[in-house]
Image (cartoon, helix red, strand yellow):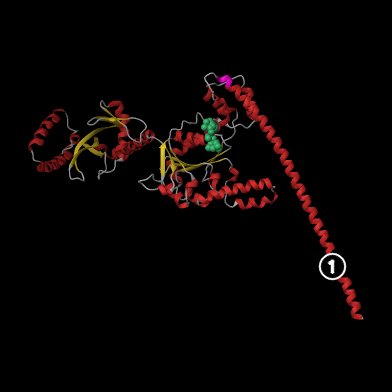
Amino acid sequence: MIDTAAIWGLTGTTVTSFMFLWAIYSQYVPRHLRSYIEKYVYKLLGWVSLYVHIKFTEYTEEGLKRSENYDAIRNYLSTNSAARALRLKADESKNSKALVLSMDDHEEVEDVFDGVKVKWHSNVKEIQTNSSSGRGNSGERRYFTLTFHKRHREMIIETYLEHVLREGKDIGLRNRERKLYTNNSSSEWYPWRSGKWSNVPFHHPATFETLAMDPEKKERIKKDLVKFSKGKDYYKKVGKPWKRGYLLFGPPGTGKSTMISAIANFLKYDVYDLELTTVKDNSELKKLLLDTKGKSIVVIEDIDCSLDLTGQRKSKKEEDDEDDDDEEKKKKDDEKKAKMEAEKQSKVTLSGLLNSIDGLWSACSDEKIIIFTTNFVDKLDPALIRRGRMDNHIEMSYCRFEAFKVLAKNYLEIESHELYGEIKRLLEETDVSPADVAETLMPKSDEEDADVCIKRLVKTVEEEKEKAKKLAEEEEKSKAEREERRRKKKEEKKKKEEEDKKKKTEEEDKKVQGSEVNGDLHDSNGTN
Ligand SMILES: Nc1ncnc2c1ncn2[C@@H]1O[C@H](COP(=O)(O)OP(=O)(O)OP(=O)(O)O)[C@@H](O)[C@H]1O
Ligand SMILES: [Mg+2]
């Protein structure tokens, strides 16, 4: 069938007469003759028309796969056509969180790029397909036609189309429903089962605005993220894979997991929450990482607990164990047992993890952030967290006044209070996690206003301060007791050693004396 959009270059009355001819042609000319005629008409149009037409179909040649370019163009035109076209179509795609308004079939919109005018036309064609049962089915195939003047051919093909596809893909990524993935155990790694990763829509509400931390630090992190996300060309230029590692460390409840959600929402990335204890070995780990998409964050939470990743440092530590008293030894034994349990389940090693982060990252898709979190940064092997692997080390600390102000604004919608001075002083002196502050600030009923919550916070922090003081005193006391025990043990050991030595010397003296007496006897016997 002749592509009607292909003759778009012709005007007014020509089009009307052509339509009349077209009706006669489709009714009276036999089908087998039409393909010949169409072939030559196309050739003729190519000679006389000043316009170039490019067709973008909804499905690939084989008809099986949806064309990514078609979707990108549709997204691109959705911003254009929503403003200009009169008939629009509301698409509700499975992976899109927003309604995509694209132009309806047989609509047309103009676009201007670098001062050059082009036209996009949306078309639909009836097709006959043969099903496996042998019966013919009819369906619709959609396509876009781009029309522009011959003299802009080079610019359109080389620059404009690249711009349209890039923009369209970006719009698609912005509109897509973001996902939170979690890894499955390898027994489920079949396409007809769950595959390597299961996912749910990612709807965590945390943002940098709601994250309580030092504002300057927050700005630095945001700038770093923006630079990374726009760094495609830079990373290519310096020959580095386009990835960045973040290490988030700090005590429990200081917002490490919240920060991950804030980063994901800020960059509009998916999140892959990698549970290392369900990964059997290094090869499984590599396969999992290779199966992650770009524009995503791979997270390994509590890396120190996931596996024994502390490497050789362990043996050095063991040497110091001798000085510990029984209580500490028991604690360490329990820790070791827990780690051995984890190792039994998973054989992922430190070097395996390092290889997966470094070696294969370059091979899998671009634009990826890997985040490790830990409560104990000192426990980690330096090889794991060196710059280049973990480029940015971020300490999430206890709630100080600046962070408190963010929480008060979020939870109580206040920016000042007469007790702010008191709170500032208390928070500088006392270590309270943002999680605790947030919980205290949250109104527990409709009767509780900001004043009640702020007073409760003052009380809570004062109590925490008292508790911390008592704990410090107790620790000091038990430390002194431990020192005393250690000193006594050493003294006893020394005393025992001295006694043993003395005993030994006495025994040796006795022996010498004995042998002298024997010698004398022998001598006297000999002379007899
Ligand atoms: N810096 C923060 N800003 C805002 N809210 C926070 C912050 N830190 C903690 N919270 C609040 O406390 C809760 C717990 O915080 P989160 O899970 O992020 O802590 P975490 O550092 O990951 O703790 P853990 O080390 O135990 O995993 C969050 O749901 C959030 O409401
Ligand atoms: Mg956490």
> Going by the image, does 109 lie left or right of 450?
left
At mark 1, the secondary structure is: helix
Q: In this view, does 308 lie above or below 160?
A: below
Q: Where is residue 132 in the image (x, y as percent from the top left)?
A: 21, 46
Q: In this view, does 356 lie to the left or right of 316?
A: left
Q: Is residue 481 left or right of residue 218?
A: right
- Look at 70% across and 38% down and name the residue there: 475
> What span is colored magenta in the figure?
448-452
In the rendering, at what x and y percent does residue 279 appear?
Answer: 47, 48
Q: Mark 1 points at which residue?
A: 511
Above or below — where is 158 with respect to 420?
A: below
Q: Using the rendered view, name the quadrant where residue 20 is placed.
A: top left
Instruction: Please provide percent x and percent y for residue 509.
Output: 85, 65
Check if residue 371 falls in the magenta segment.
no
Mark 1 surroundings within 10 Å by alpha-carbon count, few (fewer than 14), some (14 through 19), many (20 or more)? few
The residue at 45%/52% (across/down) is: 283
Report if residue 265 is visible in the image.
yes
Q: Please give the name of the residue rendered at 56% of the width and 50% of the height, measured from the top-left corner.
A: 340
Q: Which of 120 and 488 is in front in this view?
A: 488
The picture places residue 153, in percent across and down from the top left corner, at 26, 39
> Which quadrant is home to the N terminus?
top left
